[in-house]
Amino acid sequence: MVTESSCLDNCLVCVFYVFAFTALVFEPLYYIGCDWNYDTCYYEDTSSLVRICKAIWNIYCKWDPIFYAPPEWLKVICYIEVFLFGPLYALSAFGLHYRCDWLPFVALPFAGALFYSTIVYFVMEFVYTEPGTNLILVFIVNIPW
C-alpha cells in the first residue's frame, strides 16, 4: 500500500540528497582534489570545480582549522563519510521517497552508525581543538549530519 508523502518526508528526502551530494561530490573534490592539504592545493593547478570547493572549504576551515591539514583520524572519518555514508544517504532518500519496505533495514543501522560517527567526531574535535576553532559553529554546521 502506497501512502502520500508528508511534507516532513519530502523535506527529509531533499536533505538526504543534499547530504549524498555533499559526501559523494563536494567532499571528494576537496579531499582528493587538494590531496588533503589546503596549502598545497593551488588554484592554478586544479580544475575549476576543485577551486570552487577549496573556496567554500576555506570558509569552513576558518571555523575549524584542523581541516587545513587534517590528521589521520579525521581522514578516516571523512573517508567513511564519502565511501559508506554517501551512498547510504542516497539509498535512504530513494527508499523514503518511494516508501520502500526495506528502508528500516537500511536506515536503522545507518542511523546508529551516523550517531556513533558524529559522537566520535565531536569528542575528537573537543579533545584536539586547534587554536582558532569556533566549536559553536562547528557544532551548528555538523549537527544535522
Image (tube, rainbow, N blue to C red):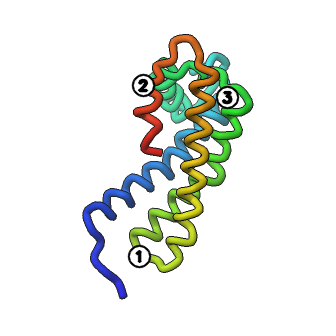
> Along the horizontal axis of the image, is 139 left or right of 81?
left
- Furthest toward the left, the residue is 7
What residue is rendered at 57% in x and 56% in y?
A: 112
Residue behind mark 2: 136
Which mark's residue is nearer the viewer, 3 or 1?
1
- At a point 67% along the width and 43% down the height, the residue shown is 79
Where is residue 67? Give x, y as percent: 59, 25
Whether pointer 1 and pointer 2 mark residues with C-beta atoms closer than 8 Å, the reply is no
Q: Secondary structure at mark 2?
A: helix
Q: Mark number for residue 36?
A: 3
Please, what is the three-letter code of the amino acid marked with disc 3?
Trp
Kind of residue indicated by mark 2 = Ile
Label ID, residue 99: 1
Give the label, 1 or 2, closer to the camera: 2
Q: How far, Cα to Cα, is label 3 from label 2? A: 24 Å
Q: Give the amino acid at mark 1.
A: Arg
